[in-house]
Image (cartoon, coloured by chain):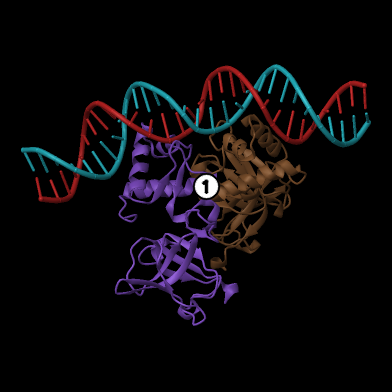
Chain colours: A brown, B purple, C red, D cyan
Amino acid sequence: MADDLTPRQREILDFIRNTLEVLGAPPTRAEIAGAFGFASHNAAEEHLKALAKKGAIVLDPRSARGIRLVEQLGLPLIGSVAAGSPLLAVENQLGRVQLAPQLFSPRADYLLQVRGNSMTGAGILDGDLLAVHKTTEARSGQIVVARLGDEVTVKRLRRRGSRIELVAENPDYAPIVVAGPLAIEGLAVGLIRNGSAL
Amino acid sequence: MADDLTPRQREILDFIRNTLEVLGAPPTRAEIAGAFGFASHNAAEEHLKALAKKGAIVLDPRSARGIRLVEQLGLPLIGSVAAGSPLLAVENQLGRVQLAPQLFSPRADYLLQVRGNSMTGAGILDGDLLAVHKTTEARSGQIVVARLGDEVTVKRLRRRGSRIELVAENPDYAPIVVAGPLAIEGLAVGLIRNGSAL
DNA sequence: CCGCATACTGTATGAACATACAGTTACGCA
DNA sequence: TGCGTAACTGTATGTTCATACAGTATGCGG
Protein backbone atom coordinates (compact mmCIF):
# COMPACT_ATOMS: atom_id res chain seq x y z
CA MET A 1 0.00 0.00 0.00
CA ALA A 2 2.95 2.28 0.60
CA ASP A 3 4.47 1.41 -2.75
CA ASP A 4 1.79 2.45 -5.21
CA LEU A 5 2.71 6.11 -5.09
CA THR A 6 2.25 8.36 -8.09
CA PRO A 7 5.43 9.89 -9.55
CA ARG A 8 4.49 13.24 -8.06
CA GLN A 9 3.91 11.73 -4.64
CA ARG A 10 7.27 10.02 -4.87
CA GLU A 11 8.88 13.40 -5.56
CA ILE A 12 7.17 14.88 -2.53
CA LEU A 13 8.38 11.98 -0.40
CA ASP A 14 11.93 12.47 -1.67
CA PHE A 15 11.71 16.14 -0.82
CA ILE A 16 10.66 15.28 2.73
CA ARG A 17 13.57 12.86 3.02
CA ASN A 18 15.95 15.49 1.70
CA THR A 19 14.65 18.24 3.97
CA LEU A 20 15.00 15.92 6.92
CA GLU A 21 18.65 15.36 6.05
CA VAL A 22 19.57 18.90 5.09
CA LEU A 23 17.48 20.83 7.59
CA GLY A 24 17.26 18.31 10.41
CA ALA A 25 13.49 18.64 10.55
CA PRO A 26 10.56 17.81 8.27
CA PRO A 27 9.31 20.58 5.94
CA THR A 28 6.22 22.71 6.44
CA ARG A 29 3.42 22.80 3.86
CA ALA A 30 4.68 26.18 2.73
CA GLU A 31 8.22 24.89 2.24
CA ILE A 32 6.96 22.01 0.11
CA ALA A 33 4.81 24.38 -1.93
CA GLY A 34 7.77 26.72 -2.34
CA ALA A 35 10.13 23.98 -3.45
CA PHE A 36 7.72 22.70 -6.11
CA GLY A 37 6.45 26.08 -7.19
CA PHE A 38 2.90 25.54 -5.96
CA ALA A 39 0.93 28.74 -5.65
CA SER A 40 -1.15 27.20 -2.90
CA HIS A 41 0.20 25.32 0.09
CA ASN A 42 -3.00 23.35 0.02
CA ALA A 43 -1.50 21.38 -2.85
CA ALA A 44 1.19 20.26 -0.42
CA GLU A 45 -1.43 19.47 2.20
CA GLU A 46 -3.27 17.19 -0.19
CA HIS A 47 -0.12 15.39 -1.24
CA LEU A 48 0.66 14.79 2.41
CA LYS A 49 -2.81 13.42 3.00
CA ALA A 50 -2.41 11.09 0.04
CA LEU A 51 0.99 9.93 1.33
CA ALA A 52 -0.48 9.39 4.78
CA LYS A 53 -3.42 7.42 3.39
CA LYS A 54 -1.01 5.22 1.46
CA GLY A 55 1.01 4.63 4.61
CA ALA A 56 4.25 6.29 3.53
CA ILE A 57 4.13 8.96 6.24
CA VAL A 58 2.34 9.62 9.50
CA LEU A 59 0.96 13.07 10.16
CA ASP A 60 1.06 14.49 13.66
CA PRO A 61 -2.15 16.56 13.88
CA ARG A 62 -1.79 20.30 14.41
CA SER A 63 1.92 19.97 15.01
CA ALA A 64 4.29 22.22 13.10
CA ARG A 65 6.47 20.09 10.82
CA GLY A 66 4.53 17.09 12.09
CA ILE A 67 5.50 14.75 9.27
CA ARG A 68 7.10 11.43 10.08
CA LEU A 69 8.53 8.96 7.60
CA VAL A 70 7.15 5.50 8.31
CA GLU A 71 10.39 3.99 6.95
CA GLN A 72 12.35 5.40 9.85
CA LEU A 73 9.71 4.92 12.50
CA GLY A 74 10.99 1.69 14.01
CA LEU A 75 9.54 0.05 17.11
CA PRO A 76 9.30 1.62 20.54
CA LEU A 77 11.64 0.00 23.04
CA ILE A 78 10.05 -0.46 26.44
CA GLY A 79 12.34 -0.65 29.44
CA SER A 80 11.28 -1.25 33.01
CA VAL A 81 7.62 -0.47 33.44
CA ALA A 82 6.64 2.06 36.08
CA ALA A 83 3.98 0.76 38.46
CA GLY A 84 0.48 1.61 37.35
CA SER A 85 1.53 3.20 34.06
CA PRO A 86 0.40 1.90 30.69
CA LEU A 87 3.04 -0.30 29.11
CA LEU A 88 3.49 2.00 26.14
CA ALA A 89 3.57 5.22 28.17
CA VAL A 90 6.28 7.61 27.04
CA GLU A 91 8.10 7.39 30.38
CA ASN A 92 8.61 3.68 29.83
CA GLN A 93 10.13 4.11 26.39
CA LEU A 94 13.89 3.88 26.18
CA GLY A 95 13.82 4.97 22.56
CA ARG A 96 13.09 3.42 19.22
CA VAL A 97 14.74 0.60 17.38
CA GLN A 98 15.00 0.81 13.63
CA LEU A 99 13.26 -2.39 12.69
CA ALA A 100 10.50 -3.41 10.33
CA PRO A 101 7.50 -4.58 12.39
CA GLN A 102 6.64 -7.01 9.57
CA LEU A 103 9.84 -8.90 10.29
CA PHE A 104 7.73 -10.86 12.75
CA SER A 105 4.46 -12.63 12.34
CA PRO A 106 2.05 -11.50 13.58
CA ARG A 107 3.44 -8.01 13.32
CA ALA A 108 5.47 -6.76 16.31
CA ASP A 109 4.11 -3.63 17.95
CA TYR A 110 6.92 -2.95 20.38
CA LEU A 111 10.05 -4.37 21.93
CA LEU A 112 10.24 -5.20 25.62
CA GLN A 113 13.57 -5.38 27.37
CA VAL A 114 13.47 -8.59 29.39
CA ARG A 115 14.63 -8.48 33.01
CA GLY A 116 15.48 -11.57 35.02
CA ASN A 117 16.18 -15.19 34.18
CA SER A 118 12.76 -16.76 34.53
CA MET A 119 12.60 -17.67 30.82
CA THR A 120 16.14 -18.84 30.15
CA GLY A 121 14.80 -22.33 29.38
CA ALA A 122 13.02 -20.85 26.37
CA GLY A 123 16.21 -19.07 25.30
CA ILE A 124 15.04 -15.70 26.57
CA LEU A 125 17.90 -14.18 28.53
CA ASP A 126 18.25 -11.17 30.79
CA GLY A 127 18.56 -8.05 28.65
CA ASP A 128 17.06 -9.56 25.51
CA LEU A 129 14.60 -7.53 23.52
CA LEU A 130 11.33 -9.36 23.15
CA ALA A 131 9.25 -8.46 20.11
CA VAL A 132 5.66 -8.24 21.25
CA HIS A 133 2.43 -8.26 19.29
CA LYS A 134 -0.19 -6.27 21.10
CA THR A 135 -3.23 -8.44 21.76
CA THR A 136 -5.38 -9.58 24.67
CA GLU A 137 -5.95 -13.05 23.30
CA ALA A 138 -3.54 -15.93 23.65
CA ARG A 139 -3.73 -19.68 23.41
CA SER A 140 -2.37 -22.15 25.91
CA GLY A 141 1.32 -22.76 25.36
CA GLN A 142 2.11 -19.35 23.97
CA ILE A 143 4.59 -16.98 25.60
CA VAL A 144 2.80 -13.85 26.69
CA VAL A 145 3.42 -10.48 28.25
CA ALA A 146 1.00 -10.32 31.16
CA ARG A 147 0.15 -7.80 33.77
CA LEU A 148 -0.57 -9.03 37.29
CA GLY A 149 -1.71 -6.02 39.23
CA ASP A 150 1.21 -3.60 38.90
CA GLU A 151 3.70 -6.20 37.71
CA VAL A 152 4.48 -6.84 34.06
CA THR A 153 5.91 -10.28 33.40
CA VAL A 154 6.86 -12.57 30.53
CA LYS A 155 5.73 -16.18 30.97
CA ARG A 156 4.29 -19.15 29.12
CA LEU A 157 0.52 -19.34 29.34
CA ARG A 158 -1.05 -22.65 30.40
CA ARG A 159 -4.75 -23.41 30.61
CA ARG A 160 -5.50 -26.53 32.61
CA GLY A 161 -9.24 -26.87 32.46
CA SER A 162 -10.52 -23.70 34.07
CA ARG A 163 -7.22 -23.02 35.83
CA ILE A 164 -4.85 -20.51 34.24
CA GLU A 165 -1.13 -20.68 34.93
CA LEU A 166 1.82 -18.48 34.04
CA VAL A 167 4.76 -20.85 33.77
CA ALA A 168 8.40 -19.84 33.93
CA GLU A 169 10.94 -21.70 31.84
CA ASN A 170 13.39 -22.10 34.67
CA PRO A 171 13.23 -24.75 37.42
CA ASP A 172 14.10 -22.10 40.01
CA TYR A 173 10.74 -20.41 39.45
CA ALA A 174 7.42 -21.92 40.47
CA PRO A 175 4.38 -21.59 38.20
CA ILE A 176 2.02 -18.78 39.07
CA VAL A 177 -1.60 -19.84 39.36
CA VAL A 178 -3.66 -16.90 38.33
CA ALA A 179 -6.20 -15.87 40.91
CA GLY A 180 -6.61 -12.11 40.67
CA PRO A 181 -7.11 -10.05 37.56
CA LEU A 182 -4.97 -11.20 34.65
CA ALA A 183 -4.46 -8.82 31.78
CA ILE A 184 -2.66 -10.14 28.76
CA GLU A 185 -0.75 -7.28 27.20
CA GLY A 186 0.69 -9.08 24.25
CA LEU A 187 2.12 -12.10 22.58
CA ALA A 188 5.83 -12.80 22.15
CA VAL A 189 6.50 -12.98 18.41
CA GLY A 190 10.27 -12.67 18.26
CA LEU A 191 13.52 -11.91 20.01
CA ILE A 192 16.49 -9.63 19.47
CA ARG A 193 19.73 -10.08 21.31
CA ASN A 194 22.33 -7.36 21.33
CA GLY A 195 25.82 -8.49 20.39
CA SER A 196 27.27 -7.38 23.71
CA ALA A 197 24.85 -9.70 25.52
CA LEU A 198 25.94 -12.79 23.60
CA MET B 1 33.12 27.17 24.06
CA ALA B 2 30.54 24.50 23.36
CA ASP B 3 31.69 22.39 26.28
CA ASP B 4 31.25 24.70 29.25
CA LEU B 5 27.56 24.06 29.54
CA THR B 6 25.79 24.20 32.88
CA PRO B 7 24.22 20.94 34.09
CA ARG B 8 20.79 22.29 33.29
CA GLN B 9 21.83 23.31 29.80
CA ARG B 10 23.25 19.85 29.26
CA GLU B 11 19.89 18.39 30.26
CA ILE B 12 18.14 20.62 27.75
CA LEU B 13 20.59 19.58 25.06
CA ASP B 14 19.98 15.92 25.88
CA PHE B 15 16.27 16.49 25.65
CA ILE B 16 16.68 18.02 22.20
CA ARG B 17 18.78 15.05 21.13
CA ASN B 18 16.16 12.67 22.49
CA THR B 19 13.25 14.47 20.88
CA LEU B 20 15.10 14.42 17.58
CA GLU B 21 15.45 10.68 17.84
CA VAL B 22 12.03 9.84 19.22
CA LEU B 23 9.94 12.38 17.36
CA GLY B 24 12.04 12.86 14.23
CA ALA B 25 12.01 16.63 14.67
CA PRO B 26 13.41 19.13 17.18
CA PRO B 27 11.12 20.18 20.06
CA THR B 28 9.20 23.43 20.34
CA ARG B 29 9.73 25.79 23.27
CA ALA B 30 6.46 24.60 24.74
CA GLU B 31 7.50 20.96 24.50
CA ILE B 32 10.75 21.69 26.31
CA ALA B 33 8.91 23.64 29.00
CA GLY B 34 6.41 20.82 29.35
CA ALA B 35 9.06 18.14 29.67
CA PHE B 36 10.91 20.05 32.39
CA GLY B 37 7.84 21.35 34.16
CA PHE B 38 8.52 25.00 33.37
CA ALA B 39 5.49 27.19 33.86
CA SER B 40 6.80 29.59 31.24
CA HIS B 41 8.09 28.58 27.84
CA ASN B 42 10.32 31.61 28.06
CA ALA B 43 12.54 29.54 30.34
CA ALA B 44 13.05 27.20 27.39
CA GLU B 45 13.69 30.13 25.10
CA GLU B 46 16.44 31.43 27.34
CA HIS B 47 18.08 28.04 27.62
CA LEU B 48 18.07 27.79 23.85
CA LYS B 49 19.65 31.21 23.55
CA ALA B 50 22.34 30.21 26.02
CA LEU B 51 23.00 26.99 24.10
CA ALA B 52 23.16 28.93 20.85
CA LYS B 53 25.58 31.49 22.33
CA LYS B 54 27.81 28.67 23.52
CA GLY B 55 27.77 27.13 20.08
CA ALA B 56 25.98 23.89 20.94
CA ILE B 57 22.99 24.58 18.72
CA VAL B 58 22.02 26.88 15.89
CA LEU B 59 18.63 28.56 15.97
CA ASP B 60 16.72 29.09 12.75
CA PRO B 61 14.92 32.40 13.33
CA ARG B 62 11.13 32.38 13.33
CA SER B 63 11.05 28.80 12.16
CA ALA B 64 8.90 26.30 14.04
CA ARG B 65 11.14 23.67 15.61
CA GLY B 66 14.09 25.60 14.18
CA ILE B 67 16.72 24.05 16.43
CA ARG B 68 19.76 22.40 14.90
CA LEU B 69 22.41 20.48 16.76
CA VAL B 70 25.83 21.71 15.79
CA GLU B 71 27.26 18.24 16.48
CA GLN B 72 25.35 16.81 13.56
CA LEU B 73 25.83 19.79 11.31
CA GLY B 74 29.04 18.63 9.67
CA LEU B 75 31.12 20.63 7.23
CA PRO B 76 29.92 21.86 3.86
CA LEU B 77 31.62 20.05 1.00
CA ILE B 78 32.53 22.39 -1.84
CA GLY B 79 32.87 20.88 -5.29
CA SER B 80 33.84 22.72 -8.44
CA VAL B 81 33.40 26.43 -7.99
CA ALA B 82 31.22 28.24 -10.49
CA ALA B 83 32.92 31.30 -12.02
CA GLY B 84 32.19 34.49 -10.13
CA SER B 85 30.24 32.82 -7.34
CA PRO B 86 31.29 32.97 -3.72
CA LEU B 87 33.11 29.83 -2.67
CA LEU B 88 30.50 28.89 -0.08
CA ALA B 89 27.49 29.60 -2.31
CA VAL B 90 24.83 26.94 -2.06
CA GLU B 91 25.23 25.98 -5.72
CA ASN B 92 28.83 24.99 -5.06
CA GLN B 93 27.97 22.72 -2.16
CA LEU B 94 27.93 19.02 -2.88
CA GLY B 95 26.51 18.29 0.55
CA ARG B 96 27.73 18.05 4.08
CA VAL B 97 30.23 15.74 5.64
CA GLN B 98 29.66 14.59 9.21
CA LEU B 99 32.90 15.73 10.76
CA ALA B 100 33.89 17.71 13.82
CA PRO B 101 35.45 21.02 12.70
CA GLN B 102 37.64 20.93 15.83
CA LEU B 103 39.37 17.86 14.45
CA PHE B 104 41.67 20.34 12.75
CA SER B 105 43.61 23.24 14.13
CA PRO B 106 42.77 25.95 13.46
CA ARG B 107 39.17 24.83 13.06
CA ALA B 108 38.09 23.75 9.58
CA ASP B 109 35.23 25.75 8.10
CA TYR B 110 34.61 23.71 4.99
CA LEU B 111 35.96 20.94 2.80
CA LEU B 112 37.13 21.60 -0.74
CA GLN B 113 37.28 18.80 -3.24
CA VAL B 114 40.68 19.10 -4.92
CA ARG B 115 40.85 18.89 -8.70
CA GLY B 116 44.06 18.29 -10.63
CA ASN B 117 47.53 17.11 -9.74
CA SER B 118 49.33 20.37 -9.06
CA MET B 119 49.89 19.54 -5.38
CA THR B 120 50.76 15.85 -5.57
CA GLY B 121 54.22 16.66 -4.20
CA ALA B 122 52.57 17.75 -0.96
CA GLY B 123 50.51 14.57 -0.85
CA ILE B 124 47.36 16.28 -2.04
CA LEU B 125 45.87 14.15 -4.79
CA ASP B 126 43.09 14.61 -7.27
CA GLY B 127 39.76 14.03 -5.52
CA ASP B 128 41.04 14.60 -2.01
CA LEU B 129 38.98 16.67 0.37
CA LEU B 130 40.97 19.58 1.69
CA ALA B 131 39.92 20.90 5.08
CA VAL B 132 40.04 24.67 4.88
CA HIS B 133 40.07 27.30 7.60
CA LYS B 134 38.43 30.46 6.35
CA THR B 135 40.84 33.37 6.65
CA THR B 136 42.39 36.06 4.50
CA GLU B 137 45.75 35.98 6.22
CA ALA B 138 48.48 33.49 5.50
CA ARG B 139 52.22 33.29 6.06
CA SER B 140 54.81 32.36 3.49
CA GLY B 141 55.14 28.60 3.13
CA GLN B 142 51.55 27.80 4.00
CA ILE B 143 49.21 26.02 1.62
CA VAL B 144 46.33 28.30 0.78
CA VAL B 145 43.09 28.37 -1.15
CA ALA B 146 43.38 31.43 -3.34
CA ARG B 147 41.19 33.11 -5.85
CA LEU B 148 42.81 34.57 -8.96
CA GLY B 149 40.09 36.40 -10.81
CA ASP B 150 37.47 33.71 -11.42
CA GLU B 151 39.75 30.79 -10.66
CA VAL B 152 39.99 29.09 -7.31
CA THR B 153 43.24 27.25 -6.76
CA VAL B 154 45.18 25.42 -4.06
CA LYS B 155 48.87 26.32 -3.89
CA ARG B 156 51.73 27.00 -1.53
CA LEU B 157 52.18 30.68 -0.75
CA ARG B 158 55.68 32.17 -1.12
CA ARG B 159 56.67 35.71 -0.32
CA ARG B 160 60.03 36.64 -1.80
CA GLY B 161 60.59 40.20 -0.70
CA SER B 162 57.69 42.11 -2.18
CA ARG B 163 56.96 39.43 -4.76
CA ILE B 164 54.16 36.98 -4.02
CA GLU B 165 54.15 33.54 -5.63
CA LEU B 166 51.71 30.66 -5.70
CA VAL B 167 53.85 27.56 -6.02
CA ALA B 168 52.61 24.17 -7.17
CA GLU B 169 54.10 21.04 -5.65
CA ASN B 170 54.60 19.34 -8.96
CA PRO B 171 57.50 19.95 -11.39
CA ASP B 172 55.06 20.00 -14.30
CA TYR B 173 53.53 23.22 -13.02
CA ALA B 174 55.37 26.53 -13.05
CA PRO B 175 55.02 28.94 -10.11
CA ILE B 176 52.48 31.69 -10.58
CA VAL B 177 53.80 35.15 -9.87
CA VAL B 178 50.91 37.14 -8.55
CA ALA B 179 50.29 40.30 -10.52
CA GLY B 180 46.56 40.98 -10.45
CA PRO B 181 44.27 40.88 -7.48
CA LEU B 182 44.97 38.00 -5.11
CA ALA B 183 42.29 36.99 -2.68
CA ILE B 184 43.19 34.41 -0.10
CA GLU B 185 40.08 32.43 0.70
CA GLY B 186 41.47 30.15 3.31
CA LEU B 187 44.22 28.07 4.79
CA ALA B 188 44.65 24.34 4.32
CA VAL B 189 44.42 22.75 7.75
CA GLY B 190 43.86 19.10 6.92
CA LEU B 191 43.07 16.47 4.36
CA ILE B 192 40.56 13.68 3.95
CA ARG B 193 40.99 10.97 1.40
CA ASN B 194 38.13 8.70 0.55
CA GLY B 195 38.94 5.00 0.68
CA SER B 196 38.05 4.48 -2.96
CA ALA B 197 40.65 7.08 -3.97
CA LEU B 198 43.49 5.30 -2.18
C1' DC C 1 -20.20 10.32 -21.28
C1' DC C 2 -20.10 10.22 -16.25
C1' DG C 3 -17.81 9.61 -12.06
C1' DC C 4 -13.60 9.53 -9.71
C1' DA C 5 -8.78 10.38 -8.72
C1' DT C 6 -4.82 13.39 -9.32
C1' DA C 7 -3.05 17.77 -9.22
C1' DC C 8 -3.51 21.81 -8.58
C1' DT C 9 -5.37 27.64 -7.43
C1' DG C 10 -7.32 30.76 -4.04
C1' DT C 11 -9.04 32.01 0.39
C1' DA C 12 -9.80 31.71 5.24
C1' DT C 13 -9.31 30.62 10.18
C1' DG C 14 -7.62 29.22 14.49
C1' DA C 15 -4.06 27.04 16.92
C1' DA C 16 0.79 26.44 17.33
C1' DC C 17 5.17 28.77 17.81
C1' DA C 18 8.92 31.97 18.31
C1' DT C 19 10.25 35.65 20.84
C1' DA C 20 10.39 40.12 23.27
C1' DC C 21 9.93 42.51 27.83
C1' DA C 22 9.41 43.01 32.83
C1' DG C 23 10.08 40.71 37.08
C1' DT C 24 11.94 37.37 40.93
C1' DT C 25 15.22 34.30 43.44
C1' DA C 26 19.57 32.28 44.27
C1' DC C 27 24.53 31.96 43.89
C1' DG C 28 29.34 32.89 43.01
C1' DC C 29 32.79 36.58 42.44
C1' DA C 30 35.43 40.80 43.40
C1' DT D 1 27.98 44.73 49.55
C1' DG D 2 27.01 44.86 45.04
C1' DC D 3 27.13 42.99 40.32
C1' DG D 4 26.64 39.54 36.93
C1' DT D 5 24.78 35.15 35.57
C1' DA D 6 21.68 31.23 35.79
C1' DA D 7 17.18 29.83 36.15
C1' DC D 8 13.18 30.70 36.27
C1' DT D 9 7.49 33.11 36.34
C1' DG D 10 4.10 35.78 33.88
C1' DT D 11 2.40 38.27 30.01
C1' DA D 12 2.02 39.74 25.37
C1' DT D 13 2.43 40.01 20.31
C1' DG D 14 2.70 38.73 15.74
C1' DT D 15 4.00 35.37 12.56
C1' DT D 16 4.11 30.65 11.12
C1' DC D 17 1.59 26.59 10.26
C1' DA D 18 -1.88 23.16 9.79
C1' DT D 19 -5.96 22.51 7.73
C1' DA D 20 -10.74 23.13 6.02
C1' DC D 21 -13.67 24.57 2.03
C1' DA D 22 -14.77 25.96 -2.68
C1' DG D 23 -13.13 25.77 -7.27
C1' DT D 24 -10.72 24.29 -11.99
C1' DA D 25 -8.40 21.20 -15.39
C1' DT D 26 -6.93 16.63 -16.93
C1' DG D 27 -6.94 11.87 -17.64
C1' DC D 28 -8.65 7.20 -16.89
C1' DG D 29 -11.91 3.30 -16.24
C1' DG D 30 -16.54 1.78 -16.89
Q: Quadrant of residue A169?
A: bottom right
B24 sits left or right of B36 in the view: right
B59 sits left or right of A196 in the view: left
Q: Find disc 1 in the rendering and name its residue.
A: A23
Percent position of residue B179, x then y: 40, 67
Percent position of residue B156, x then y: 41, 73
Depth check: give the residue in front, A162 or B134: B134
Identified by mark 1, the residue type is Leu
Which quadrant is the C terminus of chain B positioned in? bottom right
B182 sits left or right of A73 in the view: left
Would you place residue B140 above or below residue A181 in this image?
Answer: below
Other-residue count near label 1 (Cα within 10 Å), few / some / many at <14 / 14–19 / ≥20: some
Percent position of residue D11, x then y: 33, 22
Depth check: give the residue in front, B15 or B191: B191
Would you place residue A85 above or below residue D9 in this image?
Answer: below
Q: Is residue A134 visible?
A: no
For label 1, the SS is helix
